[in-house]
Image (cartoon, rainbow, N blue to C red):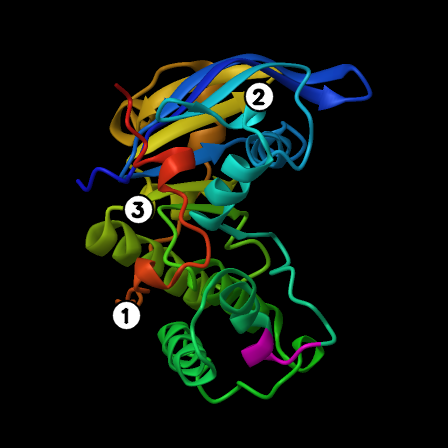
Amino acid sequence: MKKSAPDIRIEDLTIGYDNTPVVNNINATLPGGGITVILGGSGCGKSTLLKNILRLNTPLGGSVFLGKHNILTLKRKPFRCLKQRIGVLFQDGALLGSLNLFDNVALPLREHTRLKTAEISNVVKAKLSLVGLEDFVDYFPNELSGGMRKRAGLARAMVMDPDILFCDEPTSGLDPINSAELDELLLELKERFDMTIVVVSHDLASMKTIADHVLVLGDGKALFEGSKDSLLATENPYLRQFLDRRVQKREAPRLTMPQLDPSMMKMDCTKYLGDYDNN
């Protein structure tokens, strides 16, 4: 496992809205270099937890550590550096409707790197090729299917070669074949690049395929944290009721991903973050 694949450590985190808790006192360690699936039913706080980790929402209390860094208290420049090491796939892909597919995926490179136009073109086309969209560079989001928008969003999330990838319900609304392709891509990223990947999901088939580690939310608290095998063997009645739903097995081709040269970053973040040194 590469040193830059950090654990994500959640300590006494309470999340909610308007001072009303949704999930209380979450304590968990999401292992670096592996895939953690945050699992639970609709409305249990999975996506809210993800938004709090990313500082899109403000938690009611607690801390989230990435190596030695508390994400929630980092100042502006260190947090800006941290965001450059994180990729996010939102539920709907979060593509900009006014930009075609090429420009959507190229946007982070134009904002955060010194790459020249031809270099950006090569990177973007490579990422779109990995998700099967190399022939759709000039299409706009409203011209794509839901599955294609998800894959385009994943291409953009990967374009900066992040150390950490967050995915919010990546298989939601997709047919089994498209869902399986996304699962296999996530496995490929983990195996080739030792990325820390966190997937919010209620998809049991996906969890059984990709998860190394699982955090289960429900009833306003963290109900389980541990390995996938431990979860599948649990005798907890609530968890068994959730897990014993029918699961469909999927198969899909494996995909690969080229890497971005870190020397092309506009901002030297070493003095702000180092390499997630815990010491």
Q: CA distance from mark 2 to mark 1?
A: 34 Å
Q: CA distance from mark 2 to mark 3?
A: 27 Å
Residue to which mark 3 is pinned = 195
In x, y percent, where is residue 154? 48, 62
Earlier in the chain: of badge 2 and badge 1, it is: 2
Residue to which mark 1 is pinned = 253
Q: Amino acid at mark 2?
A: Gly
Query: Would residue 141 be counted in the magenta stretch?
Result: no
**Vertical arrangement, residue 98 with respect to residue 52, above or below:** below
User: In the rendered image, which quarter contains the N terminus?
Assistant: top left
Residue to which mark 2 is pinned = 218
Q: Main SS of the magenta segment?
A: helix
User: In the rendered image, which quarter contains the C terminus?
Assistant: top left
Query: Which contiguous range is marked in magenta?
Result: 99-103
Asked if one can make out residue 105 in the rendered structure from this viewpoint, the answer is yes
Tell me which residue sits at (68%, 32%) in the image. 43
- Image quarter for residue 150? bottom right
